């Protein structure tokens, strides 16, 4: 009975981001609870813009979340346009990362590869890469 009572409580997801090369721009964090739009649609889902820190890190937090399956996408948005800028071939020009630190060689990461279960307060670490 106790497990049932606590399973419906709101949770907080804390995201530690590292490997930022500069304090320019902002870091965009987007939270997805379904594959639609993952990982690049920062506008259609809950998102935050936070300032990069001098030590090459940033921090995002989403609170009052229902238990469930989520994935996080993060980018170092150098020009603050809420878009991961890419070159002609679709290769990112800005640093990015996703939950589980998934880095497919020739495609964007899938929601399924980056997903995790949230059943209570949780902290994840994401390392950005360009």
Image (tube, helix red, strand yellow):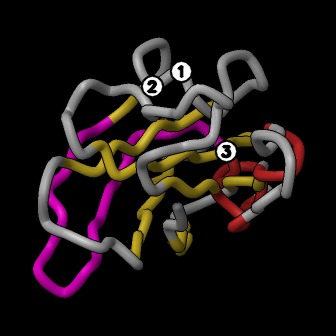
Per the picture, the main secondary structure of the magenta-coloured stretch is: strand
Whether residue 98 is in magenta: the answer is: no
Q: Which mark is residue 41?
A: 1
Question: Magenta span covers which residues?
Answer: 48-67
Whether residue 59 is in magenta: the answer is: yes
> Disc 3 marks which residue?
71
Residue occupying image coordinates x 59% and y 26%: 88
Q: CA distance from mark 2 to mark 1?
A: 4 Å
Kindly indicate the quadrant of the structure image that contains residue 68: top right
Label 1 near label 2: C-beta < 8 Å? Answer: yes
From the top left corner, tell me how far across and down residue 12 is, in percent. Answer: 44, 55
Secondary structure category for the residue under label 1: loop
Q: Which mark is residue 25?
A: none
Label 3 near label 1: C-beta < 8 Å? Answer: no
Kindly indicate the quadrant of the structure image that contains residue 21: bottom left
> Disc 2 marks which residue?
42
Counting other residues with Cα less than 10 Å from the Cα at mark 2, is it few (<14), some (14-19), or many (20 or more)? many
């Amino acid at each position: 009975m106790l497990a049932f009572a606590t399973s419906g409580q709101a949770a907080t997801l804390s995201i530690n981001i590292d490997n930022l090369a500069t304090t320019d721009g902002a870091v965009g964090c987007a939270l997805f609870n379904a594959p639609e739009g993952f990982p690049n649609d920062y506008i259609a889902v809950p998102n935050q813009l936070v300032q990069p820190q001098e030590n090459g890190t940033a921090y995002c937090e989403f609170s009052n979340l229902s238990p469930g399956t989520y994935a996080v996408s993060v980018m170092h948005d150098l020009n603050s346009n809420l878009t991961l800028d890419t070159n002609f071939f679709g290769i990112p020009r800005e640093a990015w990362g996703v939950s589980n630190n998934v880095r497919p060689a020739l495609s964007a990461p899938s929601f399924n590869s980056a997903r995790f279960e949230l059943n209570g307060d949780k902290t994840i670490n994401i390392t950005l890469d360009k």
